[in-house]
Amino acid sequence: MYKNGFKKLSIFLIISAIIAIGAFCLIGTANAVDVTIDNTTTIRDAAINNNSFTNGSTLYLIDGVYSGTGNKNLAISKNMTLAAVNKGGAIIDMENSGRAFTINAGINLTLINITFINGNSTNGGVITSTQANIILTITNCTFENNTADNGGAIYMAGAGSNNTLENSVFKNNKASANQGAVRLSGDNSINLVYNVTFENNNAGTNFGAAYLTGDNNTNLVDNCTFENNTAAISCAALRMGGVGSSNTVENSVFKNNKASTDYGAAYLTGDNSTNLVDNCTFENNTANNYGALTMAGVGSRNTIENSVFITNTAGGICGALYIFGVNSINLVDNCTFENNIASNNIGALRMGGVGSSNTVENSVFINNIASNNIGALSISGVNSVNLVVNCTFENNTASTGSYGALGISGDDSSSVLDNVTVVNNSAAINGGGIGFTNDNNVLTIKNSIISDNSAVKEGGALFASGINQTINIEGSTFVNNSAKIGGALDINGEEGKVNIDSSLFENNSATSNGGVIDINGNFHETNINNSTFNNNSARNGGVINSNGENNNITANDTDFNNNNAVNKGGVINSNGDSNVIVLDNSTVNNNIAHNGGAISSTGDENEIAIDNSELSGNKDRLVSSEGDDNKITVDNSIITNNTAKDGLITNNGDNNNIAINNTNATNNKGDIVANTGINNIVSINNSTVTVNVIYETSTTLAVVSGNGQITIIATVTKKDTDELLSGEKVYFYVNGEQVGSAITDKYGEARFIYKVPKTANYSVYAKSQETTITNSTGKYVFKESASVTKTLNVNKPLTPAKIKVYSKKTTSKKTKKYKIYYITYSIKNYGEKTGSKTFTESLKKILKKYKLYKIQTTKNTKYSYNKASKILKTMVKNLAYNKIAKLKITVYRKA
C-alpha cells in the first residue's frame, strides 16, 4: 500500500533536513564561542548585544530565574544556541509582558533544557517569526502559562522553515484566538514534533494545542501526548495540513481534549495532501461534531492504522473519526473503535466523498452508539468505491434511528463487505445491522457472518432503499436476525436486484412480513442459488414476502426447510400482479403456513413454476393462489407427505391454468388440486398422483318435540366448503346414551324419532361416523364430527283410563251348620288418566246352589243388585292410575 512508501519518504525528508541543518551550522562557526552566565547577567547583554558572541555560539544558563527587560522581547539575528546547564534549571520568566524571542529571516535558533513561563504577546507568547528559512530546534524545554492572541507559546509562520520540537512540555498555555500552544506554519516547511506533551492548553477560538500547516509541508508528530486541551470553537488538540502537504501522527495519545464545535482532538486536512495516523490512541475526546480525529481534503490520501478510539463523544455527528474528501483515497487498518458516542448520527467513523476510495480492514467496532442513525460506521459518496474487509461490528446501536452498525450511501457507488462479522447490533427504526441507500449502487456481502441483529421496524440485518440497487450475498451466514418486517433483509424502492449465492439463512424472524426478505416495490429481481433457508418465520412469508408488481423470484439448487408463516406462505408470499416465482432443482421440506405451506400468491396474471424439485412434509397446502389468469406449473418433481385441508394446490379465481407434468405425488394428505371459480383448467400428464384426502366435517342439529316424542334431524357438511354430504352414518344420543342411527340423504340430513318414557328434561346430540373411501386415485377420509348438545323439556301425554278386573279369588270356610264362600274381585286402573267403569255380572248360576249373604265394596265402588233377575252391577268411580278397588260377595249353604 502507499502508506509504507509515504513513511519512507517522510523519514528521507527528515534525515535530509537534519543533514542540511548540520551543514548549515558548520558554516560560519569557526569563530563561535561558548558563554556561560547566571541570572545576574541578561541574555541581551551576553548574546544579543555582544559582538564577540558570533554566529553559531552557545549561551549556557546557570540555574535561576531570568526576567526583566534584558531577558525578553529579544530579536534573534544571528545563529545561536541557548541551553540551560541543567534541564529545567534555567527559567525565563516574561512576567506577562512580552515574549522571549522574535527570530529574523534565515536564522538558526536552538533552545535546550529551558523553562519558559508567563509570556504574553500578540502572536507567540514566547517565540514568534513570520520570516522565511528559519531553523528552530527546541529540545527538553518546558512552556508553561504563556499567553498570546495566537500561538500561546510559539508562533512560527515563515516559508521554507525547519522546526523541531522534541522531548518538551507545553502546559497551561493559552491563546485568546487560535493555537493555544504552538503554531508552526509556512509553506514548504518541515515540522517535526517528537516526544512532546501538550497538556491543559486552551484556544479562545480554534486549535487548542498545536497547529502545523502550510502548503507542500512535511509535518511529523511522533510519540506525543495531547491531554486536556480545549478550544472554544474547533480542534482542541492538533491541526495539521496544507495543500500538497505530508502529515504524519504516530505513537501518540490524545486524551480528554474538548472542542465546543468540531474536531475534539485532531484535524488533518489539505487538498492533495498525504495524511498518516499510526499507532495512536484517542480516548475521551469531545466535540459537537467529530469527537476525536478528522482527516480531509480534495484528492487527499488518508491512512489511519494500528490505532484505538475509545469513549470519544460528539454532541452531533461522528463520535470518533471523520475521513472525507472528493476523489480521496482513505484507509483505516487494524483499528479499534469502542464505546464512542454521537448524540445525533454516526457513533464511531464516517468516511467517503465524491469519487473517493474507502477501505476499512482488520478493524473492530464494539459498543458504539448513535442516538439517531448509524451506530458505528458510515461510508458515503457519489461514484465511490468502498471496501470493508476482516472487520467486526458488535453491540453497536442506533438508539432512536436506523442502521445499528453500518450505513452505506451515495449514488453510483460500489461497496464490498468481505469476511465481516456483524453481530448483536440494533436500531430503533430500520436496519439493525446495515443500511444501504440512494440509487444505482452495488453492495456485495461475501464470506461474512451477520447474526443476532435487530430492528424495531424493518430490516433486522439489512435495510435497503433506492432505485436500481443491487445486493450480492455470497458465501455468507445470516442467523437470528429479527425485525417487524424483513427479519434479515428489507428491500425498498424500484428495479432492485438481490443475488444470493452459497449462503445460509437460519432462525431469522419477522413479527409481520418476510422472515428473511421483505420486498416492497416493482420490477425487483431476486435470484437465489445453492443456498439454505432453515427455521425462519414470519406472519406472512416465512422466508420471502414480496409486495409489488412485475417482481421475479427464482431459487435454484436451494433448500427451504422448517420455515413457518402464521398466515400466508411458509416459504414465499407474493402480493401483486404479473409476478413470477420459480423453484428449480430445490428442496422444500416441512414448511408450515395457515395458507400455502410453500407458496402463497395473491394477484392476477402471476406465474408459479416448480421444476425438478422435491416438496415434502409441508402444510397447509403446497401452493395457494388467489386471483384470475394465473398459471401454475409443476414439472418433473416429487411431492410427498404434504398436508392440505382441501387441495395441495388451491386456486381461488377464474381463468387459471394448472399443469402437473412428469411428477410423482404420493402419500399426501389432501387432494392434488382444489379449484374455486370458473373456466379453470387442470391437466395432469405423465404423472403418478395418489392422494390421501382428509376432510373435516360439520354436524348441525335440529330438534322438534311433541306428542311425547323427539324428532332429531342432523345435517352433515364439509367444513371448509359447506358441501352437503350424503351417505354418512349418524349416531343419535339422548342423555348420553346412544338411542339409534340413520344415514344422511341427498340433502345431507339424517332423522330419528325418540319416544320419551316420561315427562322430563332430555339432552340430545348427534355424531357423524368417520368414513373412508378408497379408489384408484387415493384415499378420501371424511372425519367424524359431533353436533352441539341441545336440552329440552318433553311432556308425555297421559294414557286413557283402563279399568279392569285383574284378579278373582274364592275362599271358603265351614261351620257346624253352613259352608260359606267368599268371592273377591280386584279391579285396577291401568291407564294414566283417572276413570270410572260399571261391571255387570249375573249371579244366577252361583245362586242355584248358594244363597246370597252379603255384598261388600271399597271406596270409590258402589253396587246395585236386582233380586228378581239376580243381576249385580258394580260401579267404580274416579279410580286413579294404578289404584285398586275391591268387590266381595259372600254366599252360603247348609253343611
Image (tube, rainbow, N blue to C red):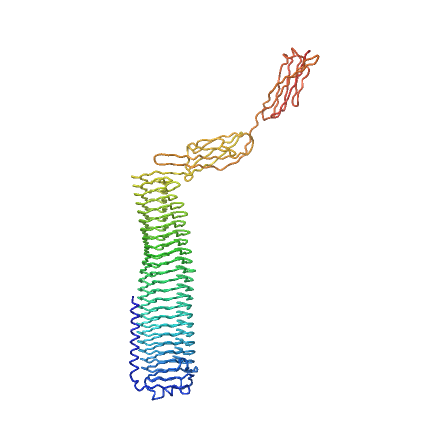
Please say whether residue 496 is visible from this viewpoint. no
Q: How many marks?
A: 0
Residue projecting furthest to the right: 816
The image shows residue 698 at horizontal and vertical percentages of 44, 38
Residue at 29%, 73% in the rendered image? 12
**Image quadrant in which the C terminus is located:** top right
**Foreground residue among 445 and 815:** 815
Left/right placement of residue 756 relative to residue 38 reads: right
The image shows residue 163 at horizontal and vertical percentages of 34, 77
The image shows residue 503 at horizontal and vertical percentages of 33, 53
Res 768 quadrant in image: top left
Residue projecting furthest to the bottom: 51
Please say whether residue 882 is visible from this viewpoint. yes
Residue at 43%, 60% in the rendered image? 399
Res 681 quadrant in image: top left
**Foreground residue among 69 and 82:** 82
Left/right placement of residue 756 relative to residue 422 reads: right
Residue projecting furthest to the front: 86
**Foreground residue among 806 and 656:** 806
**Image quadrant in which the N terminus is located:** bottom left
Res 222 quadrant in image: bottom left
Left/right placement of residue 437 relative to residue 752 reads: left
